[in-house]
Structures are given as C-alpha cells and as structure tokens.
Amino acid sequence: MIILVTGGTGFIGSHLVHKLLKLKHKVILLKRRMSDTWRINDVLKQCFIYNSDDNLEKVFRENKIDIIIHLATKYVKFHKHSKEAKEIINTNITFPTLLLDLAVKYKVNGFINTGTCFEYRLTNKKLKETDKIEPYNFYAASKIAFEEVLKFYSKNYKINAVTLKLFYPYGEKDNQKLISLVITALLQKQKLCLNSGKQKLNFTYISDIVDAYIKVLNFIFSSEYTSYEVFNTGADKAYSVRQIVHYLQKIYHDKGDINFGTSSHKNKDIKHMNCNNQKAKRLLNWQPKVNLATGLDKTYNYSISKLSEFN
C-alpha cells in the first residue's frame, strides 16, 4: 500500500514508520521542515519525504495514496495563552481537515485518525467507546472537534475512517512523560517531584499501540468495515504511579531522589483512567501482548544503552 503518514518523526509515528517499512509498504512522510528526524534517521532514505509547510496538494498529485495515517499533533496539557490555542487548532483541526479535502479530491480510500483517552468524562469504571465525551483539556477538545469533521467526511464522501483513542503509550524513544522522566531522574541522579502517586492509569507499550494501527490498516479495507468506527487502544488494567516508580527503582537498585506529594500540579492530574478494549479485541482481533514489567524493562534498558553512548 502507499501510505501517507503525518507525525512520523514523533514517538508513536517513528515506531509505526519502522513497522510499515518492514511490512514493505511505501511510506510517504509528511513532516514539518524543522522536525527533528533522530528517531527515524536509520530508515529516512526508505521514505518519500514532503514538508507540510509547502504545497500540500503536491503530495497527492505526485502519489496515488491509498490511505492516510494521521498522528501529527500539538499537545499542551493546559494552554496558557491564545498563541498556544491557535497552534493547537491549526495542527489538530485545520491541518487534518485540509488533508481530508485533498483526500476527497484525489480519491484516497482511507483515513486512520489518532484520538486520546482524555476525550472521555472521567470515571472510576472502565471506559467504553460509547461513554460520555467530556474533554479533560483544550487539547482533547480539539481532538473531539476534528473527529466530528472526520465523521462528516466519512459519511458524505465515502472515506473509510477509524479513530484510535490511545491510553497512555510509553516505550523507547518516548517524549518527556512520566515513565521516561522517572528513568531519566534515576539514571542521571536528578531530583523529581511528583504528586501523591496514587492515581491509577493505563500504560500501554508502544509495540502494542503500533500493532493496533496495523490491525486497523487491514480492517479498514475489509468486508468487516461498514462505517466510521472508534476503538479504545489501551491495556485493560490500570496501575498506580507509585507502582510504576517502585518497579523502576527496583530495576535501578536505588530509590533515587523521587519525591511524592510535592508537585505543584497535583490537583489538576487525572486520578483514575481505565480502558475497556473489548471492541478492539472483537472487531480487530487486537489486545495488548506486552505486560507492564516487560515494557518497563525494555524502556529502561533502551535508556541505559542511550546513556552509555554519551559517556
């Protein structure tokens, strides 16, 4: 297949690009001119690269694209000013809408979108795709807004479309999120302030996330696909932040300087998030294969290897 990927230089996108190339797909990478390609430098020459800052239509004119996999995003936990809000709107709503318009014009058959568990109303039960939508932050609101646009295009222009709502991806080459921050603090002997650590979340290893995209790639052009679908993509067991930290401390053989209950953002953090992934299991034949201990081991060992490169 000829696949246009946005966000391919990012954490999830880079792992997906490697997998798509391994499966012998033609990958067209649409990236910002100034994007850092360090995660995919080893396969960059295998991709067909275009800059999103240039004329987007050129990409569609020069390639018979089968499907778009959209991962590019602007994430800000809590935006502070109108400039950030504008960047979120432009990246998360305007840009993918332009892609959809071009997809219609050039008869692209499919669109795989990336959503987030932050779109759901927070609850202590396992979240299903039919649960109430109530965005946690402006970022999540922008994802919801684009989903409505995507549903419109899917229904009115016959584009096969799916949204994967991701639950706390982690793994090698991640951005500075909880697990990578804890590992960095331990390895570099830095002080790290966290909240109480009692909140329970679904941490989903990167290879399982990538596997979900591959499953959708097959599903979206199969007889099983009938209309726009949403799939929760996450482990169905939640772990507390304290459990995560304690496991990493055990691997490191030292508690380091990690302090609970000292974060200034503790009142804004999500207290509980749990995923019901039965729909993905039923329709995509997808479920997480990598347990938390294995995933943390892999992520930690990668960080060790990268640290040794600079020493």
Image (tube, grey):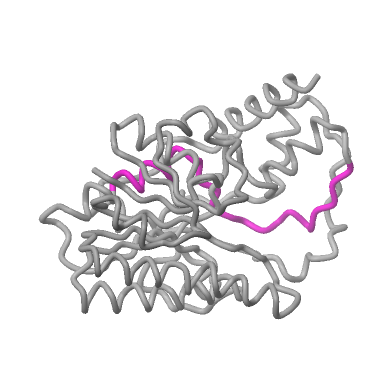
The image shows residue 100 at horizontal and vertical percentages of 33, 68
Whether residue 236 can be seen here: no
- The foreground one among 250 and 108 is 108
Magenta-span inclusion, residue 290: no
Residue shown at 72% from the left, 47% from the top:
242
Q: Nearer the viewer, residue 67 or 250?
A: 67
**The quadrant where residue 115 appears:** bottom left
Q: Residue at x 35, y 51 (%)?
A: 4
The residue drawn where x is 60% and y is 37% is: 173
From the top left corner, tell me how far across and down residue 69 is, in percent: 37, 54
Seen in the picture, residue 307 relative to 34 is either above or below; the reply is above
- Total numbered labels placed on residues in the image: 0
- Along the horizontal axis of the image, is 131 left or right of 270? left
- Locate residue 10, reporting x and y percent: 55, 47
- Name the side, left or right, on which 160 lies relative to 296: left
279 and 125: which is toward the camera: 279
**Corner quadrant of residue 109:** bottom left
Is residue 178 visible to the viewer in this orientation of the structure?
Answer: yes
Please check the rendered image and state whether residue 210 is part of the magenta-colored stretch, yes or no: yes
Please identify the quadrant where the N terminus is shown: top left
Quarter of the C terminus within the rendering = top right
- Frontmost residue, 90 versus 118: 90
Residue 24 point in image, percent of width and height:
28, 32
274 w.r.t. 210: above or below: below
Left or right for 51, reference 22: right
Range covered by the magenta-colored residues: 191-215
Q: Is residue 101 left or right of residue 77?
A: left
